[in-house]
Image: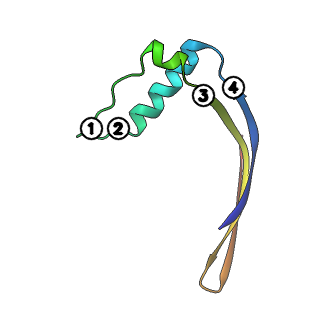
Amino acid sequence: MAGAVQGDARTVDDLDGRQAILNELRARYGTPDHKREPVSRERAEKCGAVEIVVTRMAGRKVHAKEKVAWGWEAP
């Protein structure tokens, strides 16, 4: 599969914003059997976070002998 992604990325310097993003990631990858504890403020101070906003994607996928192209653009 091949494709392209366009958008914007920014480093999250705000500590509260960084902590919120890190907590969202931890919650996303937790499981019912292994819940993730929230990231402490001290831990967030030592981590980095990058917010990525995708505005456009395109790609192609090969199914048997048929090539399928797809695209998406943010409203």
SS state under label 2:
loop
Residue behind mark 3: 49
Q: Are marks 1 and 2 in contact (CB under 8 Å)?
A: yes
Q: Amino acid at mark 2?
A: Gly
Q: Amino acid at mark 3?
A: Ala
The label shown at residue 11 is 4
**Outermost residue to the front:** 46
| Lower position in the chain sequence, tag 2 or tag 3 | 2
Q: Real-space Cα distance between discs 2 and 3?
A: 19 Å
| Lower position in the chain sequence, tag 4 or tag 1 | 4
Q: Are marks 4 and 3 in contact (CB under 8 Å)?
A: yes
Q: Real-space Cα distance between discs 1 and 2?
A: 6 Å
Q: Quadrant of the N terminus?
A: bottom right
The label shown at residue 46 is none
Q: Real-space Cα distance between discs 2 and 4?
A: 24 Å
**Residue 3 image point, x, y percent:** 72, 60
Residue behind mark 1: 34
**Outermost residue to the left:** 33
Q: Nearer the viewer, residue 18 or 69?
A: 18
Q: Crowdedness of circle 4 by 10 Å Cα count: few (<14), some, many (20+)?
A: few
Q: Quadrant of the C terminus?
A: top right
Q: Real-space Cα distance between discs 1 and 3?
A: 23 Å
Q: Crowdedness of circle 3 by 10 Å Cα count: few (<14), some, many (20+)?
A: some
Q: Amino acid at mark 4?
A: Thr
